[in-house]
């Protein structure tokens, strides 16, 4: 990018700030302790410009928040900015002309040169135009383990899935729940996705998710995944909490030995002042495969008729991906920054593992990027039924094959 273009962009942003303060309502579903600490970094940075961040937190996970967010936009009562995940969730809103085009801001900021992996920006792009700002890299591919739980059971902290499964009887004998699992379908489906990548392997996973290969979905690689899901279901028997952060707290307090959950769980460990490598361990890819799926969060800006608000929306989009804000937000969130050009030496041991995997290029897209919301919902519904029943591995796999065969 030419220096003059950068200067013009900077001048534009400064002039917007100087003109008048603007209040922007920002909706999101970050309500746990760690998440609230992270989103406050955005709010502090925006308020420091002289504008005002009006926080529109929606209790519950994305599955609860997204319908509310979309309903408001479609109903003519849009917020100024809203969190959504990367992928296909916003396609119809963009096609309907309801989302602000951020292409000029992205070009002025050189987003194409700094966003890593590039798939995150690709997922914000439709017909060559950019409609969202990616703010982090979140990966589901983590198993979190409580050192206190394994110490109480008198056994070593596992280094992979097989060791973890083998430790379950000793944990149960010590009165410790082997696996914490929240009773929500997105958590159960997410854990299944982690097992699919780690235990079926990348080649089989790509065959199913990219090529929609129902033979692979019904084959031996995925049979191992469903058999392991039965084992995980047994290990989580007695886990009666609902929310993911409640399950994480069971690991933090040593009531449970482990949890399969995305790297956002790290924010909860930080709030509890636990130290990675000392109080808890983190195993990417269940310790079986050093690989990350690279989804994350992005912010979209619904179209507004007020030009002053529109200018402020563009300013906020640029601010969210700025180097300083990226560092502050992601250190608090436990996620990885989307910028590949910033220094992250302050990251803890688990974040450093993630940064190394990212640098090595051992990454995959997420199901959100590859499946439509309808297909994702079908998989979540199957997992919800599976985790709350005695459904066999064979029956669950058969139904999964049918979903893959019909996936669009």
Image (tube, helix red, strand yellow):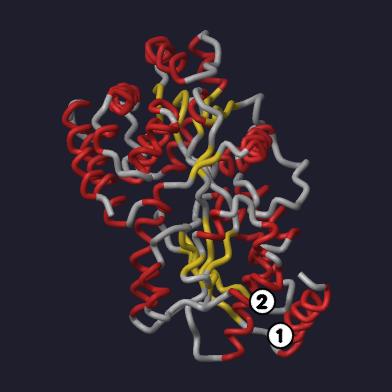
What secondary structure is marked by label 2?
Answer: helix
Are the residues flagged by discs 1 and 2 in contact, CB closer than 8 Å? yes
Residue 266: x and y in percent read 58, 40
Out of 278 and 118, give the one closest to the viewer. Answer: 118
Q: Is residue 173 above or below residue 77?
A: above
What secondary structure is marked by label 1?
Answer: helix
Q: Quadrant of the C terminus?
A: bottom left
The structure residue drawn at horizontal position 61% and vertical position 54%, both measured from the top left corner, is 38
Out of 386 and 30, give the one closest to the viewer. Answer: 386
Q: Which residue is mark 1?
A: 16
The structure residue drawn at horizontal position 65% and vertical position 26%, both measured from the top left corner, is 277
Q: Which quadrant would residue 280 be assigned to in this image? A: top right
Asked whether the viewer can see residue 260, the reply is: yes
Residue 364: x and y in percent read 50, 42
Out of 249 and 218, give the one closest to the viewer. Answer: 218
Q: Which quadrant would residue 50 be assigned to in this image? A: bottom right
Work out whether mark 1 precedes mark 2 in sequence or the reverse, and give the earlier one.
Answer: 1
In the rendered structure, find residue 315 and report the number of the disc placed on it: 2
Label 1 Cα crowd, 10 Å radius (few <14 / some 14-19 / many 20+): some
Residue 251: x and y in percent read 49, 30
The Cα atoms of the two marked residues, 1 and 2, are separated by 8 Å
Residue 160: x and y in percent read 50, 19
The structure residue drawn at horizontal position 71% and vertical position 53%, both measured from the top left corner, is 327
């Amino acid at each position: 990018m030419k220096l003059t273009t950068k200067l013009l962009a900077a001048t534009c942003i400064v002039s917007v700030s100087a003109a008048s303060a603007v209040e922007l309502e920002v909706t999101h579903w970050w309500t746990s302790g760690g998440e609230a600490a992270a989103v406050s970094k955005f709010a502090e940075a925006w308020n420091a410009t002289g504008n005002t961040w009006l926080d529109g937190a929606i209790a519950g996970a994305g599955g609860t928040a997204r319908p509310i967010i979309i309903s408001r936009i479609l109903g003519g009562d849009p917020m100024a900015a809203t969190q959504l995940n990367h992928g296909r969730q916003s396609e119809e809103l963009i096609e309907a002309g309801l989302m602000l085009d951020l292409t000029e801001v992205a070009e002025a900021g050189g987003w194409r040169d700094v966003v890593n992996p590039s798939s995150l920006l690709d997922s914000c792009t439709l017909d060559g135009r950019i409609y969202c700002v990616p703010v982090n890299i979140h990966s589901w591919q983590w198993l979190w383990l409580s050192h206190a739980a394994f110490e109480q059971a008198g056994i070593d902290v596992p280094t992979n899935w097989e060791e973890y499964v083998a430790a379950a009887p000793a944990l149960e004998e010590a009165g410790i729940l082997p696996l914490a699992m929240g009773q929500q379908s997105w958590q159960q489906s997410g854990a299944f996705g982690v097992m699919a990548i780690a235990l079926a392997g990348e080649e089989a996973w790509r065959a199913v998710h990219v090529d929609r290969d129902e033979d692979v979905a019904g084959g031996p690689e995925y049979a191992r995944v469903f058999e392991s899901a039965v084992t995980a279901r047994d290990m989580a028997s007695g886990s009666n909490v609902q929310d993911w952060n409640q399950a994480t707290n069971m690991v933090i307090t040593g009531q449970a030995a482990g949890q399969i959950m995305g790297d956002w769980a790290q924010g909860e460990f930080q709030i509890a002042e636990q130290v990675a490598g000392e109080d808890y361990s983190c195993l990417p890819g269940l310790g079986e495969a050093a690989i990350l799926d690279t989804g994350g969060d992005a912010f979209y800006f619904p179209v507004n008729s007020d030009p002053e608000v529109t200018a402020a929306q563009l300013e906020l989009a640029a601010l969210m991906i700025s180097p300083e804000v990226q560092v502050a937000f992601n250190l608090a969130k436990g996620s990885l920054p989307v910028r590949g050009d910033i220094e992250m030496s302050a990251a803890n041991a688990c974040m450093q593992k993630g940064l190394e995997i990212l640098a090595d290029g051992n990454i995959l897209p997420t199901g959100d990027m590859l499946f439509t919301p309808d297909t994702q919902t079908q998989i979540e519904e199957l997992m919800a039924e599976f985790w709350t029943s005695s459904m066999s591995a064979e029956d669950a796999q058969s139904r999964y094959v049918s979903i893959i065969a019909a996936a669009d």
